[in-house]
């Protein structure tokens, strides 16, 4: 019998390896069946024009790996006991040949969920993007960051070679505590802090602790998709409460003890931008105290307060130990760092620590060491002061541009954050149409849904509401963007 083998004399692979691979493949693909006798080494070496020794060495390996067997009387043959039906060679282009019976045995994928889309797939068409929550790429403190990376690497490379406390580097937790006191009126111990990979991980940790198929979660309406989708993926049912100019309408909170938690954005409601008034903060806390619900305070962009002083965080007013506070550096330093923190009521610290350890055993050491230093040495406060001034200028520029082109505009969410909300007048197209018209001239403006918000089914105002982020665009781009939209809409309206 002549076996179909073809060896390349000029190849990066040795002749012996080629021979081994090809015979093995013929066996696994069923072309050489169990029991088939192999040509004698002398005959095969003549057929292929290679040394007998090469064939013998390849055969020896195939015997050692149980593909071939040898017996004095019978010579060398394909292993009779090879489980050939279940051993199928899986090269990429052969995947379609994998018997279906193997697939049928697989378990179904149990996860059903959706995730908010943080990256803009249409971005290539967008030259001027008013996408919400984006930082000015030039604002990242490259020089200081580089210096701190080198400093910490030089000082203690051991921080990278060891597993660390999953709750985060103590230096960072202390720096966060020292920042939160004056900035947000929160007084806690570093033991109540867990460093996480952004608010998104914080939400997953909380959901793991507090949500199952029976849970009811109160959210603002509209609310942040990133939170709602996490809770939904753990099986939660929702009780959406509308927001107005003073934030969550606390008088509409359900008077029941079956709510597990309420997720709120009191500093700058996402997406509509209201600040929860002090009166409502107290009402919300009292409600949580009475019903036993936890409150998740998502303080994602509170570093940017443009009018008046920031109100003390819910976590700073909490007499019941019910507030779970989430902070992130995604809006102040960079979302690519994936760094944030949870401030937990004492009772949740240990279970949350376990979940964090199960998830990833803690965040990368170097990033934490650098951030800790950046906050502790005063660079963070300086950085915040600087970008706050820049964002304020940009916000004012956007408001002025909208007013100069569209007259009396109805805007909200101006007091803080990185985006504003434009409530469209009836003479203008709907928000979805405006988004489309703007995109045609290379400008990104977004409906609530495309801006990462969820409104629990159709809400009339969503149809006429746009969100415009201003933080990543300079004044020239902002004016140019609004100019382009205005021209394009004027042309359309005249049609
Ligand atoms: C309401 C809200 N919370 C949190 C975040 C930040 O999430 P992360 O820290 O995971 O980047 C965002 C980002 O857009 C947000 O809009």
Image (tube, rainbow, N blue to C red):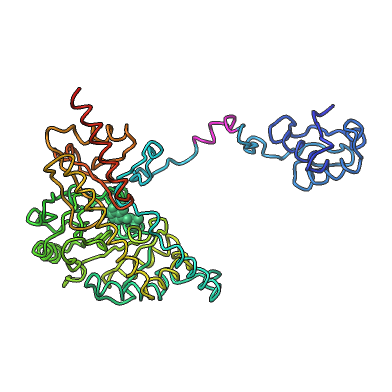
| Residue 350 placement (x, y as % from top left) | 34, 70
Question: From the image, which quarter does the C terminus lie in?
Answer: top left
Q: Quadrant of residue 437?
A: top left
Q: Is residue 476 left or right of residue 365?
A: left
* Left/right of residue 337 with respect to residue 242 in the rendered view: right
Q: Main secondary structure of the magenta part?
A: helix
**Residue 372 lies in quadrant:** bottom left
Q: Is residue 27 visible?
A: yes
Towards the viewer: 120 or 454: 120
Residue 68, given in percent of the width and then of the height, sits at 78, 41
Q: Position of residue 182 (x, y in %)?
A: 24, 74
Q: Is residue 97 above or below residue 399?
A: above
**Left or right placement of residue 433 versus residue 7 in this view:** left
Q: Is residue 103 magenta?
A: yes
| Quarter in which the N terminus is drawn | top right
Is residue 200 visible in the rendered image? The answer is no
- Along the line of sight, which residue is nearer the eye, 400 or 431? 400
Q: State the residue at coordinates (54%, 75%).
A: 156
Residue 279 magenta: no
Residue depicted at x 50% and y 69% = 163
Image quarter for ligand 1 equals: bottom left
Image-based side of 36 in relation to 262, left or right: right
Q: Which residues are magenta?
A: 95-104
């Amino acid at each position: 019998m002549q076996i179909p083998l073809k060896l390349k004399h000029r190849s990066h692979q040795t002749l012996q390896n080629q021979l081994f691979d090809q015979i093995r493949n013929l066996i696994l693909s069923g072309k050489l069946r169990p029991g088939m006798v192999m040509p004698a080494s002398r005959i095969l070496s003549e057929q292929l024009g290679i040394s007998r020794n090469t064939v013998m060495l390849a055969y020896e390996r195939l015997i050692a790996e149980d593909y071939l067997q040898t017996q004095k009387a019978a010579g060398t043959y394909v292993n009779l006991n090879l489980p050939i039906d279940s051993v199928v060679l899986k090269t990429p282009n052969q995947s379609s040949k994998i018997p279906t019976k193997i697939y049928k045995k697989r378990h179904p994928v149990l996860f059903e969920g959706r995730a908010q889309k943080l990256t803009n797939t249409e971005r290539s068409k967008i030259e001027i993007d008013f996408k919400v929550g984006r930082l000015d790429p030039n604002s990242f403190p490259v020089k200081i960051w580089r210096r701190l990376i080198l400093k910490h690497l030089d000082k203690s490379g051991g921080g990278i070679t060891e597993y660390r406390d999953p709750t985060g580097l103590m230096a960072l937790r202390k720096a966060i505590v020292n920042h939160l006191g004056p900035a947000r009126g929160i007084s806690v111990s570093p033991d109540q802090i867990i460093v996480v990979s952004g608010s998104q991980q914080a939400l997953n940790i909380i959901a793991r602790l507090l949500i199952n198929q029976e849970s009811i979660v109160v959210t603002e309406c509209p609310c942040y998709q990133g939170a709602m989708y996490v809770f939904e993926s753990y099986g939660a049912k929702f009780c959406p409460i509308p927001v107005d100019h003073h934030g969550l309408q606390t008088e509409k909170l359900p008077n029941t003890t079956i709510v597990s938690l309420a997720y709120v954005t009191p500093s700058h409601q996402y997406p509509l931008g209201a600040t929860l008034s002090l009166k409502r903060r107290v009402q919300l806390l009292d409600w949580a105290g009475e019903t036993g619900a936890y409150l998740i305070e998502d303080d994602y962009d509170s570093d940017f307060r443009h009018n008046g002083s920031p109100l003390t965080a819910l976590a700073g007013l909490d007499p019941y130990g019910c507030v779970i506070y989430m902070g992130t550096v995604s809006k102040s330093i960079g979302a690519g760092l994936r760094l944030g923190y949870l401030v937990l009521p004492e009772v949740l610290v240990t279970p949350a620590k376990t979940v964090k350890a199960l998830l990833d055993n803690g965040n990368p050491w170097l990033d934490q060491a650098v951030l800790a230093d950046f906050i502790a040495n005063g660079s963070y406060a300086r950085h915040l002061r600087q970008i706050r001034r820049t964002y304020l200028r940009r916000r004012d520029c956007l408001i002025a541009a909208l007013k100069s082109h569209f007259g009396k505009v109805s805007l909200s969410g101006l007091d803080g954050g990185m985006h504003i909300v434009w409530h469209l007048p009836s003479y203008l197209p709907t928000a979805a149409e405006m988004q489309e018209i703007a995109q045609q001239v290379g400008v990104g403006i977004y409906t609530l849904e495309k801006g990462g918000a969820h409104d629990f089914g159709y809400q009339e105002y969503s149809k006429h509401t746009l969100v415009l982020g201003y933080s990543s665009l300079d004044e020239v781009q902002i004016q140019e963007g609004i100019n382009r939209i205005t021209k394009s809409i004027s042309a359309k309206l005249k049609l």
